[in-house]
Amino acid sequence: MSLASPPHTQAPELARLVRLAARLAGAPAAFLSLGDDPPVYAGADEGWSARREAPLARSLCGRVVAEGRTLRMADARAHAEPALWLGEGAYLGVPVRGADGSVAGCLCVVDAQPRAWSDDEAEMLAGVAELAGRALQPAAALERAAAAVADGRISLRVLEKAVETMQVGVTITDMEGRIVYTNPAEARMHGYSVEELIGQHGRIFAPRESHRRIEPGPMDGVASWSRETVNLRKDGTPFPVLLRSDMVMDAQGRPAGLVTCCEDLTARKALERKLLHNAFYDQLTGLPNRGLLTHRLDLAVERAQRGEGGFAVLMAGLDRFKRVNDGLGRAAGDELLRAVAERLRDCIRPDSMLARMAGDEFAILLDEAHGPGEAIRVARCMQEVLRAPFNLPAGEVFTGASVGIALSMTGYTKAEDVLRDAAIAMYRSKDRDQGHYQVFDLEMHAQAMERLRMEGDLRRALERRELRVHYQPVVALETGRVSGFEALARWEHPERGLVFPDAFIPLAEETGLILALGMEVLEDACAALRRWQARPGCEGLTMAVNLSARQFSDPGLAERVERTLRATGIAPGTLKIEITESVILQLTAEVSETMSRLKALGVELYLDDFGTGYSSLSYLHRIPLDALKIDRSFVGPNAGAESPHLVRTIVAMAQALGVTVVTEGVERAETVAELRRLGCQFAQGYFFAHPLDEPAATALLDKHPVW
Ligand code: C2E
Ligand code: MG
Ligand code: MG
C-alpha cells in the first residue's frame, strides 16, 4: 500500500485560517509560512508581491521561527533587519507549533502603514496559529509515517499500531465504498465499535443529503482531497469534521481504495467561535465592543440614508471612574464596570445595542429612533440606574454618567462621524456638569473645531512667546499696604487681543501644554519679584503663582521650582504656590511627596478658591497648607445673604488651625471693613487694583498706596 501525498493538502483549511487571522487583526494581509514553499496568503493583492514569493528564511517570519516567539513591530520600516524586510509598515508574527510542540512555521499579519498591535491582537493571532498547528497535525503525521514505511525505517506493523492509537479517525474503503479498515478513534468519534463498522458502506458517517458515489472515472488524476463537512454519530447527532482522502494504489498503480482521515472539529470550531467572539465582544463585561457597534452603526447609517428609518447613538462616560481605579485599584475598577454594564442593560430594548467602547465609555445604538425623544428617555434611565451606590467588595462607590447623544437627523454618511459627535456632546455634558446629557448640534461641532484651532494657536503662542503675566496686588489688611502680588497669565493673541485664562488654561491642562506654560509664568513672576524686591522697602514682597493639578503630577515639579528659586535668587518664603482642590482630590503618593518637597524648600502652599468645590476642612490636616484663599463668590456683588456668616466661620476655623486667610474678589470698601473686623489678614480685588502688567504694577508700588 502506498499513500500519495501531494503538497498543501490542507490548503483550503489553512487559507481559511489565514483569512481569519487578517480579519481578526483588522490587517490588510496575513501570511502563513511553513517551509520553503511560498506562504499561504490572504489579503488584497497590491503591494505584497515580494512577500507572497518569499520563503520562510527570507522574511521576518524566519526570525519568529528561529526564536520561537512572537515578534511585534509597530513600525517595521526602521527596526527590521534589511535582509529580512519585505516592505511591512507594521508586523506581528507568531510561531505555529506542530503536535510535538516544535515550531513548524509562522503566522503573521502585516500592514503597509505603521500601527500598534494590541495584546488582544497578539493573543488572537496566537489562537489562530494554534488552530493552524492542529490542522497540520493529522496530515503531517500520516505523511511522515508513510514516508518512514517507504524507506524502511518502520515496519507496516508499527505503522498499523500507530494508526490504531492515533487520535484522528482513519478509515480505508474499497472501490465500492465498503469499509475494510477503521481505527478505534474513528469508531469512538462516531459512537460505534470497530466491529460494527467493518463491511459497512462509508456513507454510514454522512448525512443523507451528502450521500454520493465516488466514481473512479472523474477521480482519475486526483490523488488526494480535503473538505470540511458534517458527519453523523450512531445516535444521529451531527458534528463538524475535516476529512482528507487519499487514493490508495495497488501494485500496478491502479486505484484500489481510499484512506480517509477524519478529524473532529467540534473543539476547534468552539475555539474559532471564541476567537470571533473575543474580536467583537468586550471580555470584561461581555458587551459588544467598539468594532461590533461600529458595524451595526454602519448599517443604520446606510438605512437612514435610504430614508428607511432613523437612529440615535448615546455615548456615556462614567463620572469619577479614574478616582475609583486609582484609589481602590484596578480590580475594583473592573468590578464597577461590570456592575455598570449590568445596570445599563436595563435601559434598553432587546433590539438596541449596548457596547463598551473603551475604558469607562459605553455607547448605545437605538435603531428606529426618529427624534430625540427615545434617546433622552434612555439617557435619563442611564443616569437614574447609576445613581444608587455600588457595593463593591472594596467598598461603596458612587458614580454617574455624562451622556452625549447624536441623532441621524444630522444627516450622517459615516459611522465614525456619528461616534465623534456623540463623544463631543458627551464631553460637553461632562464640562457643564457631571451627570447630565447633551444632544449634539452643529454649533457644538463648530465649537469643537474652534477648540482644535485654539489648541494649535496655543502651541504657537508658546513658541512665539505671546504669553504675558499680569500682577494683582495683595493687600495686608492690618497695614493697608501692598504685601505682594498674584501672578495671572494672559495671552496676547495677535488677532483677538488679550485673552483671559479661563479661555485657555483648561485647554492647556487637557493638552499638557500647561507644563510649559506654567513654568513660563513661574519664571517670569519670580524674575519680576526679584526686580521689585531690589527696591528699598520692598524686600519682603511676596509672589503667589497658580499651579494646576496637572503640574503636580509632573514628578520634576519640585526640582524645577528649586531651580527657578536658585536662578532668580529670591527667598523661598516669599514664593506662594496656589493650588486648587482638584490637586487635593487626586492626592496620590507622588503629589504628597511633591508638596512635602516644596515645603522643604521653604515655599508656602495656598489653597485657592476655597469654598467653591468639595471644601472640607478635613484635608487641612492631611496637607501642609499655609493659607486659604476665600473665593470671590463669597464677597463679590453676587454673594448670597448667608455669605458673611460663611466667611466668618471660615476665618474662625482657619485661625484655630493656624492658617492665614486671604480674601479675593474684594470690590467694595464695606467688604474691606468687614474683613478687617473678622480678622482676615489679606485681601485682593478690583477695589484695590485690577491685575496689571509689570510697568503698571511698578508704577503702583512707586505711589506707596495705603488703603
Ligand atoms: P484665581 O487664581 O482665583 O485668580 C483670581 C481671579 O479673579 C483672576 O482672574 C482675577 O483677575 C480675578 N479677580 C481679581 N479681583 C477681582 C474682583 O475684584 N472681582 C472679580 N470679579 N474678579 C477678580 P483671571 O486672571 O481671569 O484668572 C482666572 C483663573 O485662571 C485664576 O483664578 C486661576 O485659577 C487661573 N490662572 C490664572 N493664571 C494662571 C496660571 O498661570 N496658571 C494656572 N494654572 N492657572 C492660572
Ligand atoms: Mg489664584
Ligand atoms: Mg481664586
Image: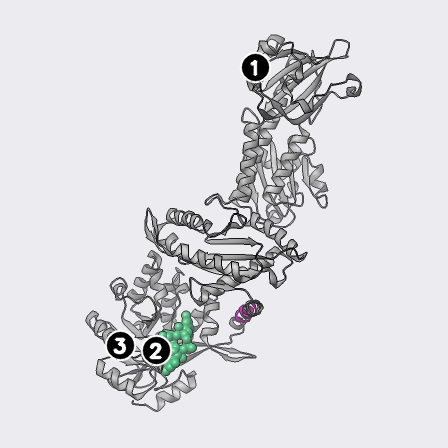
Q: Which mark is residue 632?
A: 2
- In whole angstroms, how far apart are the C-alphas of marks 1 and 2? 88 Å
The residue tagged 1 is 192
Q: How dense is the environment of label 2, judged by Cα within 10 Å: few (below 14), some, or many (20 and up)?
A: many
* Disc nearest the viewer among 3 and 1: 1
Is residue 5 or residue 323 the one in the foreground? 323
- In whole angstroms, how far apart are the C-alphas of marks 3 and 1? 90 Å
Q: Are marks 3 and 2 in contact (CB under 8 Å)?
A: no
Label 2 beta carbon less than 8 Å to ligand 1: yes
Q: Earlier in the sequence, mark 1 or mark 2?
A: 1
Q: Is residue 629 above or below residue 402?
A: below
Is residue 267 or residue 240 the one in the foreground? 240
Where residue 204 appears, x then y in whole percent? 64, 17
Q: Are marks 3 and 1 in contact (CB under 8 Å)?
A: no
* In magenta segment, residue 119: no
Residue 478's image quarter? bottom left
Work out whether residue 526 can be spotted: no
Q: Earlier in the sequence, mark 3 or mark 2?
A: 2
Q: Earlier in the sequence, mark 3 or mark 1?
A: 1
Residue 584's image quarter? bottom left
Circle 2 SS class: helix
User: Which quarter of the rendered picture does the N terminus lie within?
Assistant: top right
* Disc nearest the viewer among 1 and 2: 1
- Three-letter amino acid code of the residue under disc 3: Val
Circle 1 SS class: loop
Q: Which mark is residue 647?
A: 3
Which region is colored magenta? 450-459
